[in-house]
């Protein structure tokens, strides 16, 4: 099992910043890369805000939470970011060409022992595995938003991932306090979205067919299954722009749901939790 | 709005006993009917066991929990059960002929003002509405197992249910501490099962395609969505015999899942929580 100690995170957006912060918080040396000086500045702000959330929400984070940010090296030079990395975690935008280019650059600059992981939700890892030039040292490591609370990491190899590489990444996920979820074969949506999307689709159909109101749907789900949120609140958290985008590429029922989201929510500026208005008004 | 005070519960099985007990516990006069003296004896035992659970699990139930059982009148005479009922709640086995016969007998014996509700999960209420002879005073009132914890009651009318009858049953549900869920049109599965079944089907596919183990699937769901149980534990709670029955009537993928349940669980005597063995061993 590889003994990772230096981690590079490529892309410091919503999830990339959480991965970088949480990994550094767990004691690893972290270098975080983003495309240019401006993006690096935004990353710094994001990481600072995360430190504040850890102070408030994470047990024993305490005063040390801010020191974590100072320990993360930020750079807009990808070669420098990966030059001594044991593990590279890519969390760039969900565009095949962007991710391929990034893995190619990282593959060239990283030492031979480096392992590469993609956090992609939408792209099969086998579509990316060749970009690094070492498909046996490549796999998917998929985090969920709010990593300190929803602490799962889905580990999914391709047919060419070496078993010891897979095992070492499972070990790494556990070492930063994630529950590693071993996804045994490539599957779109991994496990979480394979379960979640059919339920959210069903909620969309209940709304478009006018069977029940959002609050009734969410009450049923929370009380009937003991869940923390109902599907409409989940859609608000995911963001209604994203929900609309996904539904508008679905079947006829889903496209009807996309229309409902657009007319009743997006066109009124209600995009979900991020704007404080979606199916509900936030904070609730 | 009708002012219900005397409630008849027809059928004192797993859910019927909970409905009868919880309604009496909430202060109503309750008569409970089952088919013969033997069934009535079993009902008495069931209600006694429920009282013990309420003592342990329900806040402020305390010493009064046992007295509730004594207040419930038990009978094997359906006419007597409904002779002065304001509301009749049917919770008989899920067979159309059984429910129709029961509603016909109750409809003949009950006063003109009586409202009739079915707790059916599987039969559309419009297939039963004529049996009582007063379809305008008929609707579905659907409880969830462990009514004191999963306190939702889905209220679903037929096209012929009178609005004031619907409103009075919504009011009744709230008065016994349920969150009334207004299901605006007839829908197989109401709201809860419309959401739950697609998610459970997806879990079945992940298992039959050998994508992840039951514990991984459940970890993802609990941690990723904040739910109390994952889908495999839900199937254990529903019972694997029931899960097998439903899956074996589904599409090709579901029939494959039925086969998996039979071979790996049922044939080994693992039927879920009721036998202490299913996907998991109980108590966990």
Image (tube, coloured by chain):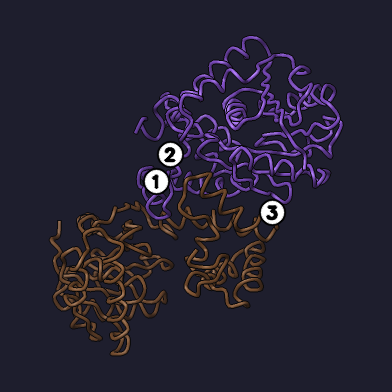
Chain colours: A purple, B brown
Say which quadrant the N terminus of chain B sits in.
bottom left
Residue at 56% from the left image edge and 43% from the top image edge: A252
Q: How many marks?
A: 3
| Marks 2 and 3 in Cβ contact (< 8 Å) | no
Give the quarter of the image for residue A113: top right
Q: Nearer the viewer, residue B266 or B2?
A: B266
Q: How many residues crowd mark 3 within 10 Å: few (<14), some (14–19), many (20+)?
A: many
- Label 1: chain? A
Q: How many residues crowd mark 1 within 10 Å: few (<14), some (14–19), many (20+)?
A: many
Residue A233 — which label? 2
Q: Tell me the distance, in whole angstroms, between the alpha carbons under discs 1 and 3.
A: 29 Å
Q: Secondary structure at mark 1?
A: helix
Q: Which residue is mark 1?
A: A218
Q: Which residue is mark 3?
A: B211
Position in image of residue B114 (x %, y %):
18, 69
Q: Is residue B266 above or below residue A119?
A: below
Q: Tell me the distance, in whole angstroms, between the alpha carbons under discs 1 and 2.
A: 7 Å
| Marks 1 and 2 in Cβ contact (< 8 Å) | yes
Q: Secondary structure at mark 3?
A: loop
Tell me, yes or no, whether dots 1 and 3 are on the same chain. Answer: no
Q: Is residue A161 above or below residue A274?
A: below
Q: Is residue B124 above or below residue B206?
A: below
Q: Secondary structure at mark 2?
A: helix
Q: Residue furthest bottom?
A: B37
Res. B69 visible in picture:
yes
- Label 2: chain? A
Q: Tell me the distance, in whole angstroms, between the alpha carbons under discs 2 and 3.
A: 28 Å
- Label 3: chain? B
Q: Earlier in the sequence, mark 1 or mark 2?
A: 1
Residue at 47% from the left image edge and 39% from the top image edge: A234
Left or right: residue A104 versus residue B253 is right
Give the quarter of the image for residue B57: bottom left
């Amino acid at each position: 099992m590889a003994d990772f100690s230096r981690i590079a995170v490529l892309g410091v957006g919503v999830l990339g910043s959480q991965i970088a912060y949480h990994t550094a918080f767990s004691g690893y040396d972290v270098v975080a890369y983003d495309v240019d000086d401006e993006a690096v500045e935004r990353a710094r702000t994001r990481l600072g805000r995360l430190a504040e959330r850890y102070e408030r929400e994470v047990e024993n984070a305490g005063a040390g939470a801010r020191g974590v940010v100072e320990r993360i090296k930020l750079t807009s030079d990808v070669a420098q970011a990966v030059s001594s990395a044991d593990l590279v975690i890519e969390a760039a935008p969900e565009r095949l060409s962007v991710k391929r280019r990034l893995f190619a650059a990282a593959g060239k600059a990283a030492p031979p022992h480096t392992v590469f992981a993609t956090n992609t939700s939408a792209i099969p890892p086998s579509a990316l595995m060749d970009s690094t030039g070492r498909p046996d040292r490549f796999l998917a490591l998929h985090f969920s938003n709010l990593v300190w609370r929803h602490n799962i990491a889905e580990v999914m190899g391709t047919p060419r991932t070496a078993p010891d590489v897979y095992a070492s990444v499972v070990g790494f996920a556990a070492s930063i306090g994630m529950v590693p979820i071993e996804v045994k074969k490539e599957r779109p949506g991994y496990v979480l979205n394979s379960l979640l999307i059919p339920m959210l689709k069903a909620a969309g159909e209940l709304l478009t067919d006018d069977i029940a109101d959002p609050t009734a749907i969410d009450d049923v789900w929370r009380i009937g299954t003991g869940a923390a949120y109902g599907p409409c609140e989940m859609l608000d958290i995911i963001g209604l722009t994203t929900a609309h985008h996904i539904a508008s590429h679905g079947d006829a029922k889903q496209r009807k749901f996309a229309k409902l989201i657009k007319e009743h929510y997006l066109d009124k500026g209600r995009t979900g939790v991020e704007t404080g208005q979606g199916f509900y008004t936030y904070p609730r």
